[in-house]
Amino acid sequence: MTPRTDSPPPRPAPGDDASVVPVGDAPLAPGRRPGGPSRPPGRPDGPEPPRLPEPADAPDEGRGPEPYGPPPNGVATLRFAVLGDSLSEGVGDRVEGRWRGWGALLAEHLGDDERPVAFRNFAVSGALSRDVAEDQTPRALAFRPHLASVVVGVNDTLRRTFDIGRLARSLDRACGELAAAGAVLLTACLPDPGRMLALPAPLARPLARRQRAVNTVVHALAARHRTLHLHLADPVWTSDRTLWSADRLHPGERGHRAIAAEFHALLAAAGLAHGTPPAREPRQPPPTTLDVLLWLATSGTGWVVRRCHDLLPQLTVLAADELRHRARGTGARLDRRAEQALTAALAAVSLDVPRAKMGE
């Protein structure tokens, strides 16, 4: 399995007036595609590839321990920050009683003897886009990262308060502040939770519509902020159950390793990763049927209860609306309504992109 990756044109150095580029002027370039040959991500002629600034020591306050040991005398340290929700926290990849995840796996393979790595994971399970912007980003900025990942959005789609405009503003703020501070950004679009959970069509369609809107925003912001971007929403990714943990919402060890390896490939192609690629094969056995049942009886039950109080009442209304429009042959109205909300959200953060087709 090789998730599809796209590498947008490189982001100019901080301070360059061209660091904010309309999406129409910065199309995504083709990169790795599932089931196809692997090749380095395409980079058109133009600005230089993203470069890491020569790092200075970060202030001790708020920095925390460096898990890879102190750097040798006179050797600068590459600082890597991870922001997001449970996917980036590492849920699904438990090692020695703790979540590890793709961020830690990637961090282990970014540096070499001449450039050690300091890694901080600010991601929190259940985080929304506004949590990343308001809480995690200021803490990450204090760490002064050279690399920063911003991967979030699924939790937003699972809330009755879902607002694509608010999500667009939050993600633009987080990416903009990190990019302005000189960090090279990693982003990803994400799978549709309704598809992952195999929900009935009337329940799955509203969630799919929301996730497509979120991914459209993420694609546009990836182009604006010249991020290294990974596609995790392709069917080849979502249909391979060996990549997923017992809960079907988070990657297992194999999935986290695949994400780490694909981000490493993007960074290596840009000259920003110097270690060997992370191994793709898991070191632990995949989840068993008993693991699935245990999750359903413990964490899964709690998750369902929380959603019953939050999303489920609204999702029931959305499903009834879906069935009514389908019966009348007016389902396209729901797609147009979502397209209009998405267009307004993109316009609110000055992103001019073609309107997404929610029915596709």
Image (cartoon, helix red, strand yellow):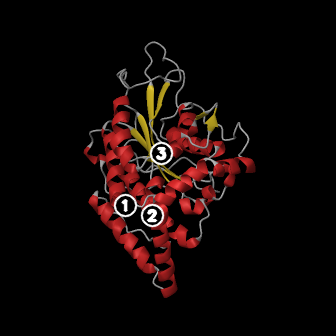
Which sits in the foreground, 137 or 71?
137
Residue under label 3: 85
Look at the numbered discs 2 and 1 and tell me whether their residues touch, using CB distance below 8 Å.
yes
Q: Relative to residue 4, is residue 257 depicted above or below?
A: above
Q: CA distance from mark 2 to mark 1?
A: 8 Å
Which sits in the foreground, 55 or 95?
95
Residue under label 1: 164
Query: Which disc number belongs to residue 210?
Result: 2
Q: Residue 270 in the image: x percent, y percent?
A: 47, 40
Give the residue at x 59% y 41%: 261
Give the residue at x 48% y 36%: 271
Task: Tell me which numbered mark, 2 or 1, is placed earlier along the sequence.
Answer: 1
User: Mark 2 packing: few (<14 Cα in 10 Å), some, or many (20+)?
Assistant: many
Q: CA distance from mark 1 to mark 3?
A: 17 Å
Task: Tell me which numbered mark, 1 or 3, is placed earlier along the sequence.
Answer: 3
Q: Residue 322 in the image: x percent, y percent?
A: 49, 76
Left or right of residue 16, residue 271 in this image: right
Q: CA distance from mark 3 to mark 2?
A: 17 Å
**Secondary structure state at the residue bearing disc 1:** helix
